[in-house]
Image: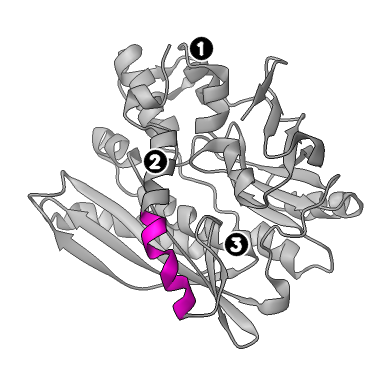
Amino acid sequence: MVTYSESGVDIDLEEVTVSALVSEIRKTLSFRDIITESGHFAALVRLGNKAIAMSTDGVGSKILVAKMMDKYDTIGIDCIAMVVNDIICVGAEPIAMVDYLAVEKADPEIAREIGKGLANGAEKSKIAIIGGETASLPEIIKDFDLAGTGIGIVDEDKIITGENISDGDVLIGIESSGIHSNGLSLARKVFFDKLSLNVDDPLPDDPDTTVGEELLRPTEIYVKPVIDLINEDMEIHGLAHITGGGFLNLKRLKKGVGYEIINLPEPYPIFKSIYNSDVPLDEMYRAFNMNIGFVVIVPPEYMDKAINIINNYKKAYKIGFVRKDIEEKVKIKTFNESIVKL
């Protein structure tokens, strides 16, 4: 049996670690007019009748796959996506970003390829990359690491924190492009260690695609459909980026409610290949997006309108409901018809 913790990533330990860090810095929230505390997808600072949203994230161990393939022109898209997809979760429109590239040794050609991906991602999300930092850290960094911090802006009356989520609200899932930029440590352990494959080998459940191509497929950027929804005359109660932690991300929106997911699409071949390599079913939904990269939560009367708008960009599905009677849990009907609770 292969689990995330065996690949070197302990989700529970990460949660404790983050709590330890946050416990020391929480007092700084009193220095400014903060609307959302740490733990949400993006933080909000009030400025008059508007708010600035901020989020930071990185590409993670997907960088190691890029190195194996000697292909660096898409990981910049992942960096942008991981940041802007968090910013829109509070109803804000992303406007700008700075990047941070830490390297073992400077390499202009790799930097140029990374820059191509950053520019591509910025174009897709209509943000400006207004600066950044490149640091040579040979005694700290192996190869390189790429991260970014973005800002967005939102009118105070359009902020979406999840506080209005109610029993019976509908969960609308927007399809992912694949594995995105999370769970790569577990995926790499499955494909490269357990199955002894390399990046040029066919994906076990999709012989027309190589392992490397699928792992490196860029993260979907959800800015356009979500901003379109926000600009419509409709209620949106919650927005969730299904990123690290899988469907546990729903629990970041509001305490005291649960979520029942009963209609997920058939998993992509990459997820079936990982599951078929002896990864526990509940681990799959804790580590991966399982075809749903973003969730929009609306009252039932707005469901059809929301799905129609999203379908102009990406496939959307009614995947479930908010349920007060399964408080603080995420209950999922899986692709093999069994039930997992996260």
* In the image, residue 193 above or below residue 255: above
Residue 321 figure quarter: top right
Q: Residues within 10 Å of mark 1 (few under 14, many from 20)?
A: some
Q: Position of residue 160 (x, y in %)?
A: 69, 64
In the picture, measured across the screen, residue 70 lies left or right of residue 244, that is left
- Look at the image and give the residue range highlighted in magenta: 21-31
Q: Main secondary structure of the magenta part?
A: helix
The tally of labels here is: 3
Look at the picture and state if 241 lies above or below 268.
Answer: below
Residue 28: percent from left, percent from top: 41, 72
Name the element at disc 1: loop
User: Disc 2 on helix, strand or loop?
Assistant: helix
Pointers 1 and 3 in contact (C-beta within 8 Å)? no
x and y, in percent, of residue 19 in the image: 42, 50
The residue wearing badge 1 is 276
- Which residue corresponds to the image point at 34% horizontal and 49% vertical from the top-left? 73
Foreground mark, 3 or 2? 2
**Mark number, residue 311:** none
Residue 213 occupies which quadrant of the picture?
top left
Q: Quadrant of residue 247?
A: top right
The residue pinned by badge 2 equals 14
The amino acid beneath tag 3 is: Ile
- What is the three-letter code of the residue carrying label 2? Glu
Alpha-carbon span between mark 1 and mark 3:
34 Å
Nearer to us of marks 1 and 2 is 2
